[in-house]
Amino acid sequence: MDILQYNREQQKPFERIKDDEIEQLLLLHNAKNRCLIRRITSKRKGSIDNDESVISNLACLSLDLTTNAEIETARSHARMAASLHAKGDIDGAEQNYKQAMMYIPNDTLDWAAYAYNLADIHMVHGQRQLALDLLQKAIHIRKLLEKNSQEIDQLQLAIENIQSQAS
């Protein structure tokens, strides 16, 4: 997964079709990101590295690897869910959004975005209460992390629509 993510960044969107298929196969077999591979393009200013700086950077990198890997795994599932949803595979999209939500803390904007998309799928299945619960959690998160946003307005409108249908 890590190499797939790394290579994806270097490609144009129309070149990613084959990688999307590979990513789907990996995700179906519970693949996870283990680390974030980055390309460093800046050149060194000096020929001798500061040992303290290098050790400090490595320590920070090792602490962030687990979190970054989980976030990248969540985003992979979310990308796959969006792709499946666009192709009409609602059940596959639902499963991938649920997976994405499992890999990311439930107090982040990413989680709120995945919850919104999953709520939409619940509405397609006629599961209004599940959709409403997700939307209410998502709007709570967004209001904590953002003042005003288009996403908050969308969530509020979706909640109002569900509540008016229930009346």
Image (cartoon, grey):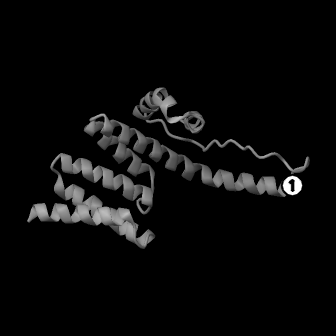
Say if 76 sits above or below 162 in the image: above
Give the residue at x 44% y 70%.
146
Specify the quadrant of the image occupied by residue 96: top left
x and y, in percent, of residue 129 in the image: 18, 58
x and y, in percent, of residue 63 in the image: 63, 54
Give the residue at x 61% y 44%.
36
Instruction: Judge left or right: residue 144 versus residue 89.
Output: right
Say if 56 sits above or below 121 in the image: below
Name which residue type carries label 1. Answer: Asn
x and y, in percent, of residue 122 in the image: 22, 49
Q: Quadrant of the C terminus?
A: bottom left
Residue under numbered circle 1: 50
Spot the residue most to the top: 18
Q: Secondary structure at mark 1?
A: loop
Give the residue at x 33% y 55%.
115
x and y, in percent, of residue 66 in the image: 57, 50
